[in-house]
Image (cartoon, helix red, strand yellow):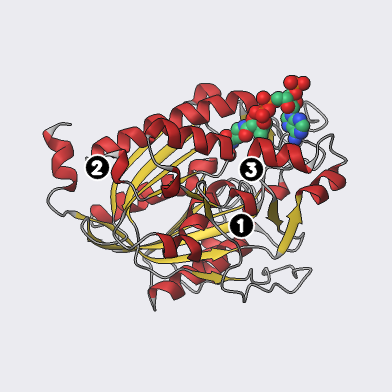
Amino acid sequence: MNAHERTFTHPARPTAVITGIGACLPPHVVDNDTVVARGDLRTDDAWIRDRTGIARRRHAGPGTSTGDLAVGAGRAALASAGDHHPEMLLLATSTPDHPCPATAPAVAHRLGLGTIPAFDIAAVCSGFLYALATATALVRSGTCSTILVIAADTYTSIVNPADRETAPIFGDGAGAVLLTAGTTDEPGAVTAVDLGADGSGSDLITVPYGGSRHPHRLPPPEPDARYFHMRGRTVYAHAVRRMTQSAGSVLRQADWGPETVRAFVGHQANQRILDSVGDRLGIAPAHRFGNIGELGNTAAASIPLVLADPAVHQAVAPGERSLLTAFGGGLTWASATLNWPAAVPRSEAPPAGPDTTPLCTPDLSRSHPWTASTTAS
Ligand code: UT7
């Protein structure tokens, strides 16, 4: 550790502090048997549970978009924080409402936030931590004092229901945090961040068709090229390696030993990946938290959905050391150290879209719409 790293956390320094936390999940719970039957997949519930840890997930109906989920999560985070007026909105997503324009301005408009700057961040499953790091830098620089960060994805809009390597894995959802200027000694403070990317692996996680490389005016290179593709086995190895390296790097930057971490939250890609990263870092299973069993891989939303889970807030006290790490398409990876927030999370149902009507009436009135678990339980 060098002198610069030490001054990063000692003494207290200005940083961004999480003062509001929100979640929004579509109401449709889809179990493994249903995913298998819908796609006529050559797999079964036992394989999916054993190889991924996933038992069920939420699917947005055709009437519910990423922007709808983002509005619900953003509204919940603002309510959690009290009456706040963010000066900027960042939306992490790789499943925007439209290829053009970005989804964030429409979300800001629907949240009644006026003409604040709003833009999307496309870092796939690392998107929330990329957005958190960007917002933290803007707060530290004095550019803004309050920023709403939302991460929302509806992978059901791009996954091929007949692809057994992706259809069972992904679920839909959104999480959000409100960041406010504060200091590194407060609960909710972001104390260090680490980001990285390696475009040499850009073909490992991709939607090949519909961008400028293979535009819609030309025929698709393959019949299923409009769908999301992932080379699972190769991605798995990269995910373990990069999340372990990045999390280790941010721990060194914060001058925190892994044994002092009380809440480890990794991107919910696969329970076996999370176990492997946790083991390599030396974090006890009792301090690892996740929701993959109930929600599957919700892409950018997976980490904030764990931050928004009331069950995790019962297990972790405000101010306790927390470690967040993610890996995704790009390839991208990111980590952050965080003092566990004091904010009480709120959940909202997806609102009706501006030009569509949801197919069902959501009921998220229960205080525990999903259940997080530690790997020890
Ligand atoms: O969120 C962004 C980051 N994403 C990730 O980090 C995901 C990383 N990858 C994974 O989680 C896993 O690779 C999968 C869950 C996608 C696949 O599980 P796996 O245990 O790693 O399987 P594998 O890729 O090593 O493939 C083993 C076999 C293959 O068959 P062959 O080639 O050995 O005949 C696959 O075709 O398992 C097959 N397979 C399946 N079999 C039954 C793949 N998916 C399934 C399935 N049911 N659903």
Task: Please indicate whether residue 359 sits to the left or right of residue 368 in the image.
Answer: right
Indicate the secondary structure of the residue bearing disc 3.
Answer: loop
Q: Which residue is mark 2?
A: 254
From the top left corner, tell me how far across and down residue 18 is, in percent. 35, 61
Ligand 1 under 8 Å from disc 2 Cβ: no
Within-10-Å neighbours for mark 1: few <14, some 14–19, many 20+ = many
Task: Determine the CA span between mark 2 and mark 1.
Answer: 30 Å
Q: Foreground: 194 or 94?
A: 194
Instruction: Single out the mark in the foreground, 2 or 1.
Output: 2
User: Given this view, does label 3 or label 2 mark the residue nearer the observer?
Assistant: 3
Q: Quadrant of residue 185?
A: bottom left
Q: CA distance from mark 3 to mark 2?
A: 31 Å
Judging depth in this view, the residue of 151 and 365 nearest the camera is: 365
Which callout, 2 or 1, points at the residue further toward the start of the chain? Answer: 1
Q: Which mark is residue 173?
A: 1
User: Residue shown at 45%/58% (left/top)?
Assistant: 307
Cα distance in 3D space between marks 3 and 1:
18 Å
Against 288, residue 244 (above or below) is above
**In the drawing, does residue 270 fall left or right of residue 355?**
left
Q: Position of residue 283 (x, y in %)?
A: 38, 40
Q: Nearer the viewer, residue 185 or 374?
A: 374
- Residue 225 visible in this rendered orientation of the protein: no
Q: Which residue is mark 3?
A: 53
Disc 3 marks a residue whose amino acid type is Gly
Above/below status of 348 relative to 35 = below
Residue type at the position of mark 1: Gly
- The residue lying at 15 percent from left, 54 percent from top is 12
Question: Residue 365: x percent and y percent?
Answer: 62, 76
Figure check: 297 above or below 240:
below
Instruction: Say if mark 2 contacts mark 1, CB within 8 Å.
Output: no
Q: Residue at x 75, y 40 (%)?
A: 46
